[in-house]
Image (tube, grey):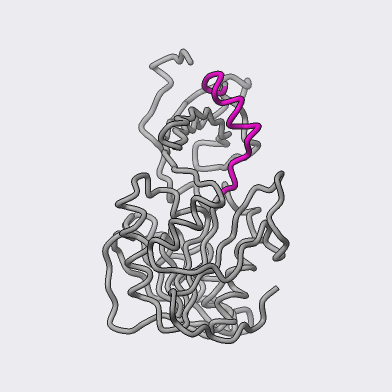
Amino acid sequence: MRTDPTLERPAISAAGRYDALHADRTADVAFYAREAAAAGGPVLEVGCGTGRVSLAIAAAGVQITGLDRDPELLSRAAAKRGAQEESPSDVRPEGGPGRLSLVCADMRAYAFRRPFAAVMMPFRVFQSMLSVPDQLAALAAARVALAPGGRLVLDLFDPRLDVLAEAAEGPAALADTGRSFHDARGRWRERVAARYDLESQIVDLTYVYERQAAAGEVAERSFERLRVRYFTRWEFEHLLARAGYEVEALYGGWEGGPPTPEGEDMIWIATKRGVRRRATRGRA
């Protein structure tokens, strides 16, 4: 893609645009809040970002720790927590943001003094682990953090074979995602181009953010690169087994239905292998 270098600017802060871009993504928040309530707490969210899921869990009355390695994202989560704490008592969530604590750490290496009833990795954050050693390290850290009978809950995107077959023919053209956000300078639309490495199972995503001037032409562009590892269903089940887990449930959607060939998500619930499971409560 050829661009005018005079239009290019450093990448816009991810923390500044994240919530606006994903404001309509609510089904997963409700799912994780239900799982957290069923676990009873305390809960650990790995890759909590700006607190999109963690704050909802805290509002449900569950004690939660949000962990992320990005200080800027955590700063925004803390600001949102503070704003909720300052809201009038008649509109403040029953559980409240005070039930949320935030920790800056890497998902491959952390330790807590107390165990957690559930460790959650929402919004495909585990797919940032590109290599097998990193994947095993992240799963091992979560396993150590889990109480006996606790649950690991995470979601991945379900790679479709037809998309992979098309990817073998070459990188996809830049496409509009249909998402946008506003800042002090105006409205930005999001576009993305994907390049699949079928051998390593890594998707190299280039996000392009374009701000339009009053006449409709592009006034500024900003870029962000994201690389994610995709997993097939049985591959990931074997990875969980290798890391010392056994699968309790696998869903193909946020309402708890089975996986389907046309599905977009794989939602996994696993427990430590050989440890007696806790009773299932309140699951959809």
Q: Which residues are magenta?
A: 157-172
Quarter residue 181 falls in: top right
Image position, residue 92 (x, y; %) = 58, 79
Q: Position of residue 99 (x, y in %)?
A: 46, 81
Question: Where residue 30 sits: x, y (%)?
Answer: 64, 68
Q: Is residue 200 magenta?
A: no
Count of marks placed on residues: 0
Does the segment drawn in magenta span residue 158? yes
Q: Up-down: is 65 above or below 181?
A: below
Which quarter shows the C terminus? bottom right
Q: Nearer the viewer, residue 83 or 229?
A: 229
Residue visible at 52% across and 77% down? 58
Rendered residue at 63%/79% (across/down)? 91
Q: Nearer the viewer, residue 177 or 228?
A: 228
Q: Is residue 112 left or right of residue 101?
A: left
Q: Residue at x 54, y 52 (%)?
A: 234
Q: Quadrant of residue 176?
A: top right
Is residue 258 rendered to the left or right of residue 158? right
